[in-house]
Amino acid sequence: MVDKEVLLKIRDKIKKKKPKFRRQEWFRKKGLGKKWRKPRGLHSKLRRHKKTRGALPSPGYGSPAEVRGLNKQGLREVIVNNLEDIQKINSSEEIAIIASTVGKKKKIEIMEFAINNNIKVGNYKLI
């Protein structure tokens, strides 16, 4: 079994080489946007993998399965809405992310619990 830190470094190298996948003809019409849509046209150069048209998403650009879905520190992010959610977190493998809909009063309660139980919180800064 390969070490998790090694796999995270491999993932970083893969992601640096990954091109930006843009929709076909995204530069011609403003309304298309830069989001990816699969080319389906019969004569589409992008669908037929012509070199100058750019790359299509394929499995080769994916992360190693053991580290897929983990953040940069190698922890799985778990969204927390209340104290019950944060009590279920395994601090060695997971990191808490406080939901955007949580108010200030409940955030303080969640942060106090996290500090007392050595649970990392990813999106909250102590003042």
Image: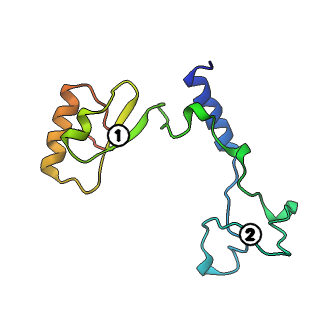
Relative side of 33 to 117, left or right: right
Image check: 40 left or right of 97? right
**Residue 83 at least partly seen:** yes
Residue type at numbered disc 2: Pro
Q: Closest to the observer: 83 or 33?
A: 83
Where disc 1 sits, the SS reads loop
Report the amino acid beneath label 1: Gly
Q: Quadrant of residue 21?
A: bottom right
Q: Quadrant of the N terminus?
A: top right
Whether residue 127 is visible to the viewer of this picture, yes or no, is no
Q: Which mark is residue 30?
A: none
Residue 94's spot in the image, x, y percent?
A: 38, 32
Q: How does the figure colour the protein chain or chains?
A: rainbow
The residue beneath circle 2 is: 39
Residue lying at 31% horizontally and 32% vertically, measured from the top left: 89
Q: Residue at x 60, y 66 (%)?
A: 35
Relative to 61, does residue 115 appear above or below in the rendering?
A: above
Q: Residue furthest left?
A: 105
